[in-house]
Image (spheres, rainbow, N blue to C red):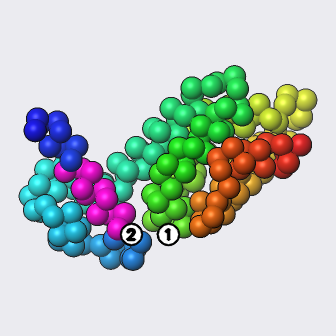
Amino acid sequence: MSENQRIRLTKTLLKNALIRLLKEQNIYSISIRELCESAEINRSTFYKYYGSQFDLLTEMENDLIGIVTDSISKYPSEPELSFYDTCKCIEDNNELFRILFNNNVDPMFPEKIFALPCIQDTISQYIGESSSEAEREYKFHFLAYGMYQVIKVWINKDKRESPQEIVDLILRKMLA
């Protein structure tokens, strides 16, 4: 196994361990010792890559933000495809999104997502240019946080609609 593969494997073990632990407790009560035991690695290996469990969480958030950015950026002029690809990404990473959206692990995570220029641009395509700047700002926040709440409900359902069905619901029924 190459060094890069070993590093990726170690980080994957740590990320999976953190997800398991976050299902049962909040980030503030998770110790490095407990995290390392769950991942079956030693503490010195953990500290080789991270300074704390918060650094690991930040990397995981940044990974998701990168995935969302890539999904939306694939179709800059086709917001429906962007939303579908993003919902597919959310479904594929449902466990982590569910933890980040529900557990207040990082209450700023939704802000980080909706601050992404690609998301702002995509949502802005539905607002239009005819409104005043203040009205566009209110519409943006209404749409962004409304979508956030719909997606939060969606990811928490055991029997969820498909990504296509949730996109249709948001774009065709709620924004119509």
Query: Residues under labels 2 and 1: Cα distance?
Result: 8 Å
Which residue corresponds to mark 2?
Answer: 22
Counting from the top left corner in percent of width and height, residue 147 is at 71, 51
- Name the one closer to the observer, 5 or 99: 5
Q: Residues within 10 Å of mark 1 (few under 14, many from 20)?
A: some
Query: What residue sits 78% from the left and 49% below the top?
Result: 169
> What secondary structure is found at the residue carrying circle 1?
loop
- Name the one closer to the observer, 134 or 49: 49
- Name the one closer to the observer, 91 or 41: 91
Query: What residue sits 77% from the left and 44% below the top?
Result: 168
Magenta run includes residue 16? yes
Counting from the top left corner in percent of width and height, residue 134 is at 83, 41
> Is residue 148 at all visible to an observer of this figure?
no
Query: What residue sits 66% from the left and 63% below the top?
Result: 153
19 in relation to 70, above or below: below
Which residue corresponds to mark 1?
Answer: 103
- Magenta-drawn segment: 10-20
